[in-house]
Image: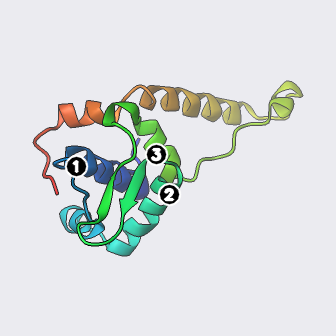
């Protein structure tokens, strides 16, 4: 299984923020250069991250972004859910009435288990595991 580009870039960008020398903010230009992606694409990702309360922006000279909460409090599942279009959950009434296929039940169960797994991994866990990653 492989994540699409949007959540992968979001996780990478969040790791850059977590590894940044605090309390400074990191610019999208720095992240874009490091991850070799466009600033406009990062702006879309960060709009979603900001909307979900994962990052905060600072305007003006020395501005940029920083984590809205401690890296120990942000899970990988939260990051993915913030930027990836999540498929709708199955309707419990449809499940009770057996109007949902077995394949839909399988994928719904798989998605729930994967989310539970990723919800146990924090941004701090990743930065401890890969502290040598390039930083902004």
Q: Give the spatial CA distance, label 2 vs label 1.
A: 22 Å
Q: Earlier in the sequence, mark 2 or mark 3?
A: 2
Dot 3 surroundings within 10 Å: few (below 14), some, or many (20 or more)?
Answer: many
Q: Nearer the viewer, mark 3 or mark 1?
A: 1
For image coordinates 27% across by 50% down, the residue present is: 17
Q: Which mark is residue 80?
A: 3
Q: Position of residue 58 (x, y in %)?
A: 35, 62
Determine crowd level at label 1: few under 14, some 14-19, many 20+ residues with C-alpha closer than 10 A: few
| Label at residue 48 | 2
Image spot of residue 106 (x, y percent) = 63, 30
Name the colouring of the figure.
Answer: rainbow
Nearer-the-camera pick, 61 or 87: 61
Instruction: Please state the horizontal and vertical placement of residue 6, each as a whole percent of the image.
Output: 42, 57
> Is there CB contact under 8 Å for labels 2 and 1?
no
* Relative height, residue 30 to residue 13 (above, below): below
Report, in whole angstroms, how far the alpha carbon at label 2 lies from the one at label 3: 10 Å
Most foreground residue, 80 or 56: 56
Residue at 25% x, 70% y is 29
Mark before the other along the chain sequence, 3 or 1: 1
Pointer 1: what residue? 23
* Residue beneath the point at 14% across and 38% down: 131
Image quarter of the C terminus: bottom left
Report helix, strand or loop for mark 3. Answer: helix
Q: Which one is in front, 13 or 88?
A: 13
Secondary element at tag 2: helix
Quadrant holding the N terminus: top left
Question: Which numbered dot is residue 94?
Answer: none
Would residue 56 be found to the left or right of residue 15 on screen?
A: right
Seen as rendered, the residue at the extreme front is 60
């Amino acid at each position: 299984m492989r994540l699409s580009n949007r959540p992968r870039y979001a996780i990478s960008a969040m790791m850059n923020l977590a590894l940044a020398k605090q309390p400074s903010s990191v610019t999208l230009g720095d992240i874009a250069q490091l991850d070799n992606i466009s600033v406009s694409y990062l702006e879309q990702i960060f709009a979603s991250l900001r909307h979900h309360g994962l990052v905060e922006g600072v305007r003006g000279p020395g501005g940029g972004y920083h984590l809205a909460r401690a890296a120990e409090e942000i899970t990988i599942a939260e990051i993915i859910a913030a930027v990836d279009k999540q498929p709708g959950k199955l309707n419990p009434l449809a499940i009770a009435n057996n109007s949902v296929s077995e394949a839909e039940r399988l994928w719904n169960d798989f998605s729930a288990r994967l989310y539970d797994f990723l919800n146990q991994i924090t941004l701090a866990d990743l930065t401890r595991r890969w502290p040598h990653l390039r930083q902004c």
